[in-house]
Amino acid sequence: MNQMAAIDGNSKGNPNFTTNDTTAQAVKDTLLAPRFYRTNYAEMDRLDVEPVRAEWDKMLAEYAADNNHDHFRGEVDYDAEMHELSPELREEFIDFLVSSITAEYSGCVLYNEIKKNVENQDVQDLMAYMARDESRHAGFINRALKHLGVAVDLGFLKREKDYTYFKPKYIYYATYLSEKIGYARYITIFRHLEKHPEKRFHPIFRWFQEWCNDEFRHGESLALIMRANPHLLRGYNKLWVRFFLLAVYSTMYVRDHTRPLLYEALGMDPTEFDFRVFDITTEISKQVFPLTLDTDSPRFRAGLERLREINVEILALKQRGGLGARIKRLGLSAAAGLTFLKLYLHPTKPNAIPEEPRLAPVW
């Protein structure tokens, strides 16, 4: 799960990665990198899902059926399908995989910690299933990294990564959005490569449909929690919903534009890709959120582009180094904060939450 408070660069190193280098990349904290979280377990222990009991029990039955049980255990013929990658593309692709494994394992760690620290059976059951799924995803990505000659030491990552405290309601908003936007990203790439199989430069993309369906179900779980506790979607909490929508969207926009060669190899334009993902995520989020962002607005799009430009300038100053560059970076960080505030104050669209709380992954 991700959030953005300001702008920073992604971690990129020498293309001749080692396992230790890759683990260090995952451990490193930047404002665009996935984070590890802790929360108020006692408050989560008091969660009541009785208002959505029928839907909740059906969802847990879906988890128990485990229709992806064998999917991530299948053998992957990397050598037969993988294209030759330039050093620059390899670097961006590894950066993409390391960011993905950090996000997946972040969820695994959080869900396991919640499970261990609560007695509420509904919460325990859900967290066990979600941790199971995220563990599979992280392990699957690590297999792909190992084939590239690198890997992330997940045990070391769990011990050494800094943890951020989030109130339970922030966990609900952020996790719901990260799972749903994860679905939208994976399914958009998968559908594109169905039409353009010649652009599938690595076999991991074949696994995206089942993978993203797991993400979709995780988001459904958080949607039910919020629907069972409607105070989370009322009053000043709408301001938090608005914040997390903008934080997730703006983080994704800035981060994706730091990987131009990756999207060029896929035959995709990162700007078009991002706004397609925003459209899907916005449509999905109408199941639970009382408002949506106006991502079609020229002013909104210009604000995201300004954040991207600031990030490019900050990255260039980081490479230059020196006191003068550091001072200029502080000014740019302030400009990023002001741009983010303007985007936050941009008018939103009200949404009437539908009676039916569940959706199907039909995109």
Image (spheres, grey):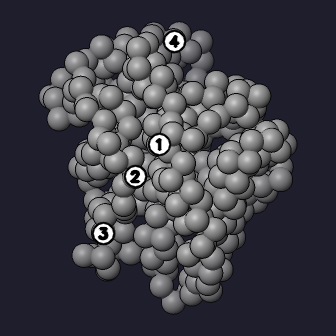
Instruction: Give SS at disc 4.
Output: helix
Q: Residues within 10 Å of mark 3 (few under 14, many from 20)?
A: some
C-alpha gap between disc 2 and disc 1: 8 Å
Residue, disc 2 = 358
Q: Is residue 193 visible?
A: yes
Near-viewer residue (325 or 193): 193
Q: Quadrant of the C terminus?
A: bottom left
Q: Are marks 2 and 1 in contact (CB under 8 Å)?
A: yes
| Residue type beneath disc 4 | Leu
Q: Which residue is mark 1?
A: 223
**Of the image marks 2 and 3, the number of the one nearer the N terminus:** 3
Q: Which callout, 4 or 3, points at the residue further toward the start of the chain? A: 3
Q: Residues within 10 Å of mark 4 (few under 14, many from 20)?
A: few
- Residue picked out by circle 4: 330
- Closer to the eye: label 3 or 1: 1
Name the spot of residue 114 as percent of width and height, x first.
75, 41
Q: Amino acid at mark 1?
A: Ala
Q: Secondary structure at mark 1?
A: helix
In the image, what residue occupies the spot 77% across and 55% down? 154
Tell which circle, 2 or 1, labels the residue nearer the N-terminal end.
Answer: 1
Residue indicated by mark 3:
191
- Confirm or deny contact between disc 4 and disc 3 (CB under 8 A): no
Q: Amino acid at mark 2?
A: Arg
Amino acid type assigned to the residue bearing label 3 in the image = Arg
Marks 4 and 2 sit apart, C-alpha to C-alpha, by 44 Å
For residue 97, above or below residue 274 = below
Q: Earlier in the sequence, mark 3 or mark 1?
A: 3
Circle 2: element type: loop
Classify mark 3: helix, strand or loop: helix
